[in-house]
Image: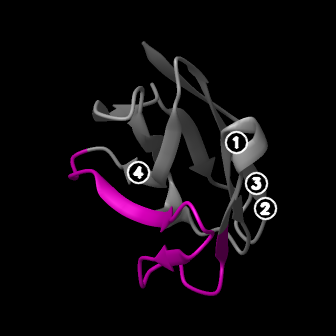
Amino acid sequence: QVQLVESGGGLVQPGGSLRLSCAASGIIFSINDMGWFRQAPGKQRELVASITSSGQPSYADSVKGRFTISRDNAHNTVYLQMTSLKPEDTAVYYCNADVRTTVFRRSVYWGRGTQVTVSS
């Protein structure tokens, strides 16, 4: 079993910043891509950013230049630094990870989500 636990969400004013963290624990052989998704009320879940095991990031157009994804492979943790936040960034943010629990077994795991609210 693998668990992903997010932290760092909260209420922030427009223009503010937040840093989300997501730590993976359990039986982990290796982790491939890790990512952050978000889901706003009444909308589909969307990819915000992802990062490969070697540290190559990619971003949704809506967050480019404002959000930065990073990871600490030694601690199986992925981060999302969010700056210049806008009300439209309000959503539940979920992390996911493509995990090998053995050489031959590979699955994608999800965290339970953390709420980010951008409002004055």
Q: Residue at x 55, y 60 (%)?
A: 53
N-terminal of the two: label 1 or label 4? 1
Residue, disc 2: 17
Residue, disc 3: 18
Pointer 4 local density, CA inside 10 Å: few below 14, some 14–19, many at least 20: many
Q: Position of residue 93 (x, y in %)?
A: 49, 44
Q: Position of residue 36 (x, y in %)?
A: 48, 53
Residue, disc 4: 38
Q: Are marks 1 and 3 in contact (CB under 8 Å)?
A: no
* Image quadrant where residue 55 sits: bottom right
N-terminal of the two: label 4 or label 3? 3
Q: In this view of the protein, which residue sits in the foreground, 66 or 21?
A: 21
Residue, disc 1: 21
Specify whether residue 98 is painted magenta: no
- Look at label 2 and name its amino acid: Ser
Q: Position of residue 59 (x, y in %)?
A: 47, 77
Q: Residue at x 54, y 63 (%)?
A: 87
Callout 3: SS: strand
Q: Are marks 2 and 3 in contact (CB under 8 Å)?
A: yes
Pointer 3 local density, CA inside 10 Å: few below 14, some 14–19, many at least 20: some
Q: Which residues are magenta?
A: 42-68
Q: Residue at x 20, y 52 (%)?
A: 44
Quadrant of image for the C terminus: bottom right
